[in-house]
Amino acid sequence: MAVATVCWTAGAVVLLDQTKLPDEETELVCRDVAALVDAIKRLAVRGAPALGVAGAYGVALGASRHDDPLTGARDAAAELSVARPTAVNLAWGVRAALTAAEVAAEAGRDVAVAALAAARGIAEQDAAASDAMAAHGLPLVPAGARVLTHCNTGALVSAGGGTAFGLVAAAHRAGILRHLWVDETRPLLQGARLTAWEARRAGIPHSLLPDGAAGSLFARGEVELVVIGADRICADGSVVNKIGSYSLAVLAEAHGVPFIVVAPTSTIDLATASGDDVEIEHRAGEEVTSYAGRAVAPAGTIAYNPAFDVTPPRLVTAVVTETGVARPVDAARIAALVASS
């Protein structure tokens, strides 16, 4: 990509503005924490791993812009952690950078430098995790597989090759991927705008479909595997991901198709027992009632617009992380993945 998904350049957090894709690769420069929080809320940067990186850089940004760097880091952490409450990586990245800043302050070292070093380390860790997840997941992809994916999980959500899409790309390079089915992913069309864009750039044979058409593919026997990412994996193996993921899991079970989740261990939240305990973000109704700034529903229509849903572990065939694979998915195996990270 001409612009990195998220990076630190000349004292600012620089993002690829994903709201402009696929038409433009536009650089968005966030010179203060408020600009970064806004970018996160309006999905200019999105995807669990990328949010972790962005959050960590945001703490460094706050430290570097404040007369008291530690206060700046703490204030930034407080704002960033709640910008999107469901995605656990955001708070995880913020917490890691803030911890580095606080340790540096106690030792009399430069707080901003320490926070930035932690953020860069998270980015490097994420890039390495992408490669490891693809390697661990590849044996789960049958030769000649037609794979269905949801939302966007490639380099646009990561400092590396991504999560679920990273595995799909690895299968394509290995010559075992027959076709990629791309859910459009309503209401913000991350599949149409972003995943189809990434698939085309990678030369992966793919077709875009309306979310509501997925069931017909299963009924026709045209899906051998479902591969998605995750915004949070709870201690029991419940998977919180983009709205519509649960529907695909139910369809996959009904048709005997494996349902694979690919995510780094930083997305696993052992402090949250199950999906019942997760605060699900609800976004503005206008995302449903309007499209491209034009109303598509009668004035006054009330929309139901949760950003995520929860898939119980009984519907998940395997969870793939950079440390290995949990199969079947249960609390003990999920904890083991984290322990080996």
Image (tube, rainbow, N blue to C red):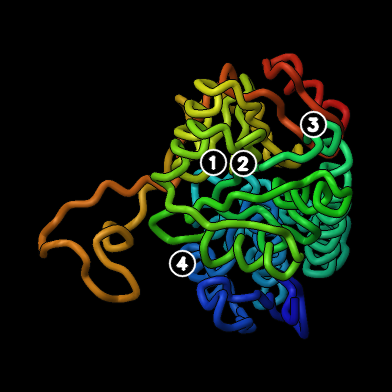
The type of residue carrying mark 2 is Ala
Q: In the rendered structure, which disc, 3 or 1, sits on the residue that comes first in sequence?
A: 3
Q: Earlier in the sequence, mark 4 or mark 1?
A: 4
Q: Which residue is under mark 4?
A: 42
Mark 2 highlights which residue? 230
Q: Tell me the tag on residue 140.
A: 3
Q: Residues within 10 Å of mark 4 (few under 14, many from 20)?
A: some
> Which residue is disc 1 drawn over?
241
Provide the secondary structure element on which disc 1 rests. strand
How far apart, in angstroms, are the residues tagged by discs 3 and 4?
Answer: 35 Å
Per the image, label 2 sits on a secondary structure element best described as loop
Amino acid type indicated by mark 1: Asn
Mark 3 or 4, closer to the camera: 3
Q: Nearer the viewer, mark 3 or mark 2?
A: 3
Residue 8, placed above or below residue 147:
below
Q: Residues within 10 Å of mark 3 (few under 14, many from 20)?
A: some
Mark 3 is on which residue type?
A: Leu
Tell me where residue 271 appears, x and y as whole percent.
Answer: 62, 27
- The image quadrant of residue 200 is bottom right
Quadrant containing the N terminus is bottom right
Identify the disc placed on residue 328: none
Residue at 43% x, 61% y is 188
The residue type indicated by label 4 comes to: Arg
Task: Pick whichever of labels 2 and 1 is earlier in the sequence.
Answer: 2
